[in-house]
Image (cartoon, rainbow, N blue to C red):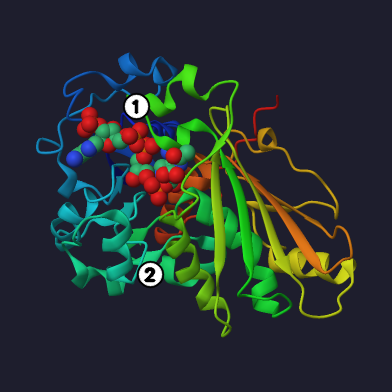
Amino acid sequence: MIKIGIVGGTGYTGVELLRILATHPHAQLTAITSRKEDGVPVAQMYPSLRGRVDLAFSSPDKANLNECDVVFFATPHGVAMAQAPELLANGVKVIDLAADFRMQDVAQFEKWYGMEHSCKDLLPEAVYGLPELNRAQIKDARLIGNPGCYPTTMQLGFAPLLKAGVIDASNLIADCKSGVSGAGRKAEIGILFSETSDSFKAYGVAGHRHTPETIEQLQRLTKDKVELLFTPHLVPMIRGMHSTLYAQLTQEISNEALQALFETAYQDEAFVDVMPFGSHPETRSTRASNMLRIALHRPGNGKHVVILVVQDNLVKGASGQAVQCMNIMFGLDESTGLQHVSVNP
Ligand SMILES: NC(=O)C1=CN([C@@H]2O[C@H](COP(=O)(O)OP(=O)(O)OC[C@H]3O[C@@H](n4cnc5c(N)ncnc54)[C@H](OP(=O)(O)O)[C@@H]3O)[C@@H](O)[C@H]2O)C=CC1
Ligand SMILES: CC(=O)N[C@@H](CCC(=O)OP(=O)(O)O)C(=O)O
């Protein structure tokens, strides 16, 4: 059994980790932290976990995290970097769902997250936790920077085209929509029910921190300079993400050949579904599952390819992906504990 600690067990990604790990056959939940709910039984706060999780939340200083085999940080940016060095020194693997270990470019991290990176020396060994593009490195990693939710859709959508060299890397456009749970479980006016329901808006248009994260990773796939215009939107759903990606083709290529690029790239992937050409994937077809679905279109004069990508922001966009990484790091079948079918409708 893998002894597991979760720092930040009361947030949306934390409770999603609990939901997935509660039925994972190799997971032994050992410590779950919350500063505000110290001593409160997990199943009292989340009745969906009654009979599944019999631990209580404990404050991070009282939790025996050093006795775990792996610790997930489902916390705001900046928390994992303060605790990772001690955990790693004690032989504990670390998977951070926040951004502390995602970007190798420290200057970009500090600019976008508005904080100094307190353990830059660990960055060279940190592995970006996107299994479909980085499986070999994840296998041997001690420290994972789990991708952001938007970057997961953008990378898996653009990757086969960039690797094949059939699109203009300097002209990528991503128009992405997220459910409100993407903003976390906190009291903030902008995410109140009465502010977000029956309404729809863009945000971060002038710049969003997921742009440099995505560019850094996409740049590893091509020698051409990657440039990306990314606009996130908040839609009145609780969970789910829909990304519409646009790329300009640089050579004559048939629809069948484009489709074949994606089908070949993801043919062995348990969690990427390439749908028939021209499909319209819906977010609900991924709800509560670790599946990401992709469909290609070629509108108008055929000079562009439009890639539609859907996922559940809390599962493939966060906690499911983190468990997928854990499975790889501990030599388990990658799908272990992650085979839930989506909830439909
Ligand atoms: N929501 C999403 O769709 C996605 C989120 N992420 C990232 O995952 C991380 C967690 O997100 P989410 O679950 O939405 O966040 P929430 O705001 O819902 O939860 C944050 C959790 O962290 C704990 N926490 C807050 N501050 C500290 C601290 N200083 N030390 C220890 N624990 C702390 C909180 O509990 P308490 O205050 O009681 O200790 C709470 O359990 C974030 O970095 C987010 O950017 C990534 C991909 C998708
Ligand atoms: C709807 C919403 O607010 N989404 C968040 C992204 C959530 C996520 O994946 O982000 P990080 O882990 O990188 O913070 C945002 O735009 O900031």
Q: In the figure, is residue 109 to the left or right of 302?
A: left
Q: Residue at x 54, y 32 (%)?
A: 239
Q: Can you say whether 74 is above or below 192 in the image? A: below
Q: Can you say whether 160 is above or below 28 in the image? A: below
**Amino acid under disc 2:** Asp
Task: Read off the residue under disc 2.
Answer: 140
Q: Which residue in the rendered view is the most extreme toward the left?
A: 61
How much space separates mark 2 and mark 1, taking CA atoms?
39 Å
Residue 174's spot in the image, x, y percent? 61, 56
Q: Can you say whether 52 is above or below 342 in the image? A: above
Residue 67's spot in the image, x, y percent? 18, 47
Q: Residue 188 — which label?
A: 1
Quadrant of residue 325 within the rendered picture? bottom left
Q: Is mark 1 within 8 Å of ligand 2?
A: no
Q: Residue at x 64, y 38 (%)?
A: 286
In the image, 116 versus 124, the foreground residue is 116
Ligand 2, seen in the image, is in the quarter at: top left
In the image, 185 versus 84, the foreground residue is 185
Q: In the figure, is residue 250 to the left or right of 42?
A: right
Q: In the figure, is residue 86 to the left or right of 228?
A: left
Q: Can the viewer see residue 13?
A: no
Crowdedness near tag 1: few (<14), some (14–19) or many (≥20) residues, C-alpha within 10 Å: few
Q: Which residue in the rendered view is the most extreme toward the front?
A: 206
Quadrant of the image for the N terminus?
A: top left
Q: Which secondary structure, mark 2?
A: loop
Q: Which secondary structure, mark 1?
A: loop
Quadrant of the image for the C terminus?
A: top right
Quadrant of residue 102 within the rendered picture? bottom left
In the image, 149 versus 195, the foreground residue is 195
Determine whether label 2 and label 1 are within 8 Å by CB: no
